[in-house]
Amino acid sequence: MNDFGQHSRQRPGKQGSRRLSMIFLLTVSVLMLVVSMYGARASAFEKAREMVLDLFEPVLTVFSMPINWVDNRVGDVGDYFNVLEQNEQLRAENAELRAWMQEALTLRQQVDYFKQMMDVKVADEASFVDAQVIGESGGPYQRSLIVNAGTGDGVEVGDGVIGTSGLVGHIVTAGKSSSRVLMLTDFNNRTPVFIEGIEVEAILAGRFQDDPELKFLATRDRAGIRPGMRVITSGTGGNLPRGLAVGEIAGITDEQITVRLFAQYNNTDFVRIVDYTFAEADPEQQEELEGGVIEEGGSPAGAAPETQAAPVGSAPEAGATQDAAANISTPSATEPVDAAPVAAPVAEAIAESGDVNG
Amino acid sequence: MVEERPFFTSVARAITPTFLGFIGVLLLVTPVRLFEGGVPTPMFPLVVVFFWSIYGPGYVPSISTFLIGLFQDLMLGGPVGVWMVVYLLVQYLVISQRDYFLGRDQHVVWLGFAICGAGAGLLVWLQHSVLAGTFVPVLPLAMQMLVTIACYPIIAIAFSQLHRRVIIEQ
């Protein structure tokens, strides 16, 4: 095609100094790589990530505009051709949803009634921050999204992120005006989940592919799992509220159980960030608890009420919470109580995945 | 001639390749989702580093390569250093083979880019495998590198037009 540039040779002296600077910068890069190997969330890098996100948030917004525009147009043309079919489908779905709505309303009333009867302290309602997806990780080994809401909007690291149909991931980097969402499919993502139907907890772990797998399951629990069972967030760890839809059991083999996610990555354009704080025990209830435990015979579980309020920290603490909860008759609605049988492995897993994501 | 050229024009020309590298990273993190996300976005910065390392190494000094790599690592949100090492090594190798590439037919240069892309891919795979402590799947990376290599001729034509008509135009 062309052969330009063949006369532009460099002087040897310049070449030597270039080689030197290149080797120097290469050494610096390798050093940075080693640092990120030993501290994936090293604070200096984390600060840099936040800064870069904030700095380029407006640029990314501008970049994603034409793409959204094209996406919408393409979608419109497709809709035009099967509008009749879609209409019928939507009618059927609407009828079904109405029936569900009635049932949900009845159930909500029932739950309210029971709550009142039992005088429980429930978690504060989560509040939501809506955000637009302005970027995604285009690298082969990272699955993350960049959204245009940050600490200025009330977003915090660890907050859950839901799309239109289910949980997408959680916040790992929060800048002032934008933040990064680590998706459930990322290799470094660990999410405590709960499998409906057999009532067991597990950890959902990404594996570089579309369907993440379940980990930390006992063999006897494993046997009961059937395809199609619903998987929801368990609320263990205190970052996510309990009951967000995650997906359903897809493939079951001897080695692994995979979960098909409800959230569709390809049409995740808008997300909601779930701002949630873990329920704290009522001060009155706490005193009652403390008194009760000491009367029972001065068991060493005196610190139990505090651990109840805090997220599940380590295995022995979770055990103590269980003991204390079993000793008292006043029901206290905190997660660790019904999570007790599996609390130990789950807590370990959470502790392990402390500085996840690299 | 050169003295008559306004200062900002020459500066703009000098930083254009680096600027393109940064734009390439931004394109990488833009949710383009070609074919419903089935086709990954090509690695534009790799093409930028490769192309100007052959035809005008002065336009992408190693500090530019370093910054493009750093920017990409920070933007992707992964471990810092992976792409910096890859881009700098690619630049080092290409500059050392520059005399061979200069004046060659574009098909040969394309082949050279393919070899570079494969090597870069292998290096990225190795780094991620070491960082993850397990062998990471090859497929997503191989797909992205194949797309990049397939796109190279088109991007190279655009870059060579830009290089000849705008950047080194006297």
Image: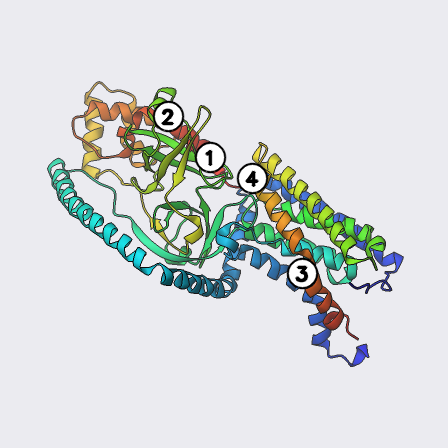
Task: From this view, report whether residue B15 is shown above or below residue B144.
Answer: below
Task: Judge the density around disc 2: few (<14), some (14-19), many (≥20) Cα neighbours within 10 Å.
Answer: some
Q: Is residue A109 left or right of residue A149?
A: left
State the image coordinates of residue B112 (x, y, percent, origin top left). Answer: 76, 50
Task: From this view, report whether residue A87 is shown above or below residue A217.
Answer: below
Q: Is residue A116 left or right of residue B3?
A: left
State the image coordinates of residue A240 (x, y, percent, origin top left). Answer: 34, 42
Q: Amino acid at mark 1?
A: Ser
Mark 1 to mark 4 CA distance (whole Å): 13 Å
Task: From this view, report whether residue B47 is shown above or below residue A238.
Answer: below
Between label 2 and label 3, give the one nearer the viewer.
3
What residue occupies the far right of the structure in this picture?
Answer: A12
Q: Amino acid at mark 3?
A: Ile
Q: Residue at x 50, y 59 (%)?
A: A54
Q: Judging from the image, what secondary structure is the residue with disc 1 in? A: helix
Mark 2 to mark 4 CA distance (whole Å): 26 Å
Q: Residue beneath label 3, please? A: B154
Q: Judging from the image, what secondary structure is the residue with disc 3 in? A: helix
Between label 1 and label 3, give the one nearer the viewer.
3
Q: Earlier in the sequence, mark 1 or mark 4?
A: 4
What chain does mark 4 sit on?
A
User: Image quadrant of residue A76?
Assistant: bottom left
Q: Judging from the image, what secondary structure is the residue with disc 2 in? A: helix
Q: Earlier in the sequence, mark 1 or mark 2?
A: 2
Q: Residue beneath label 2, please? A: A344
Q: In this view of the protein, which residue sits in the foreground, A98 or A105?
A: A98
Q: Residue at x 62, y 43 (%)?
A: B142
What chain does mark 2 sit on?
A
Q: Residue beneath label 1, please? A: A353
Q: Residue beneath label 4, please? A: A39
Mark 1 to mark 2 CA distance (whole Å): 14 Å
Q: Amino acid at mark 4?
A: Gly
